[in-house]
Image: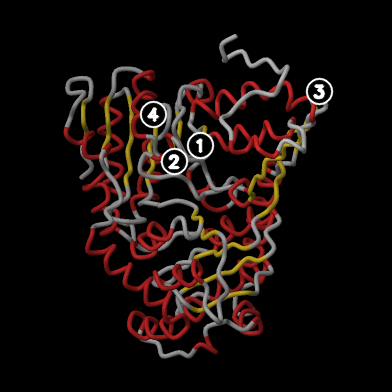
Amino acid sequence: MIEIVNLIQNPSHPRLYKILNRGLALDSELLSKVANVIEQVRLNGDQALCDFTQSFDGIATTPANLRVEPDLIKTLASQVSSQLIGFIQRAIENVKLFHKHQIEKSWQFTDEDGVTLGQRLAPLDSVGLYVPGGKAAYPTTLIMNAVPAITAGVKRIVVVTPPTTFMSSPVIAATLNELNLTEVYSVGGSQAIAALAFGTDILPKVDKIVGPGNIYVTAAKKLLYGTVDIDSIAGPSEIVVLSNPETPARFVAADLLSQAEHDPDSSAILITTNAAYAREVQLELQTRLLALPRREIAERSITNYGAIFVVGSIEQACHLVNRIAPEHVEVMINDEEKVAESITHAGAIFLGSYSCEAVGDYIAGPNHVLPTGGTARFFSPLGVYDFLKRTNIIKYNKTKLEKSIAAIVGLAESEGLTGHARAALVRFEMEQDQSRATRPLAIVPGMKLPFMDE
């Protein structure tokens, strides 16, 4: 049963401490195993991918079979009902509609001295999308990762997924078909992440890797960050519901279970100012848990990291939400928009009793790839901006450099970088004066440098 904790009486309750310190466990033994896989792929390329596919997935394959033929994707996609195809198309359109508002443009300005400064934006050349396989298929996760990359204008989008994915879940093939993604490889796990990072003969490397995976995939992304860019180190899902008796308890209980069923380490929390309502939700949740197909997972989740926190005021509730900085926050309380203004740390905020978190997962349009584990304090949802790189543009002229040279020389000398100073000064020296480069730094005759003694 989910625990009710009265934070009015005990603000430092151990349950709160456990939740606040919840994190993704990547122990040294796990990292060592994954590092070995990465090194084998780096050294042996496609053959290592085949060997690990045999070892981990029990499937024999050859380098020639790693890439999935486009015809197979279309054949498998044809097995999906037209109704489900329609739902996929609707989700794609809504996600596109939202993300087109994130498109940024290059910019520049010219100051009074004719100096041009600016920033050029360009899409990444290539991106790898990891699509989890195994017991479940997640077509919407593929949509959420692919659409912002497509919207940003990424030229090459590569998809990797475990070898059993297509045969067990043709909905993934259908989603790939609707997104017009054709460079797909049948390889999963940490070996797929290594292949994307280093490249092999069959699978050329990419510039960035996005998409969720199991703990081995997550560890590989952590170890390879820097060799390649990644989206984030994602942890288990989490939800915080801020609610009071004006919202039916069944709404809250159902929403808590919608996240608890993800993973035993997921976190589902209610924050309320009403103790009687807390007990009502507790009972409703326990009743609904009995009928949940993924009951065992959800029960472990609410036992491990679930809670109903009773606080003294809405202000305290918002403060607690910001301390937790969760992936999802539902505000189902009077004047929800005003209350939500006080919530500054959350991956996504759902306002009102009919904005259940499931609408964000599937159909609303905003990205459901969100910061977890308290990282909403400094990370943002996945978006178009994650698939763009920025290049600064600087165009000085002689007049502006002359006005700035005193500061350049002074700052360079303060850092002990005389070569930097001379690179600016040389532009005002006579061409015949070749000896200056070996002499102690001195200012150009007639040029006043305010940091030097008269």
* Cα distance in 3D space between marks 2 and 4: 12 Å
The residue to which callout 4 is attached is 322
Residue 328 circle label: 2
> How many labels, in total?
4
Q: Earlier in the sequence, mark 2 or mark 1?
A: 2
Query: Which secondary structure, mark 4?
Result: helix
Q: Earlier in the sequence, mark 3 or mark 1?
A: 3
Q: Earlier in the sequence, mark 4 or mark 1?
A: 4
At label 3, the amino acid type is Asp
Query: Which secondary structure, mark 2?
Result: strand
The residue to which callout 1 is attached is 350
Callout 2: 10 Å neighbours few (<14), some, many (20+)?
Answer: many
Q: Kindly report which numbered mark, 3 or 1, lies closer to the viewer in this rendering.
A: 3
Callout 4: 10 Å neighbours few (<14), some, many (20+)?
Answer: some
* Cα distance in 3D space between marks 3 and 2: 49 Å
* Residue at (48, 72) in percent of width and height: 195
Q: Kindly report which numbered mark, 2 or 1, lies closer to the viewer in this rendering.
A: 2
Residue 113 circle label: 3
* Cα distance in 3D space between marks 4 and 1: 15 Å
Q: Are marks 2 and 1 in contact (CB under 8 Å)?
A: yes
Q: Earlier in the sequence, mark 3 or mark 2?
A: 3
Q: Are marks 4 and 3 in contact (CB under 8 Å)?
A: no
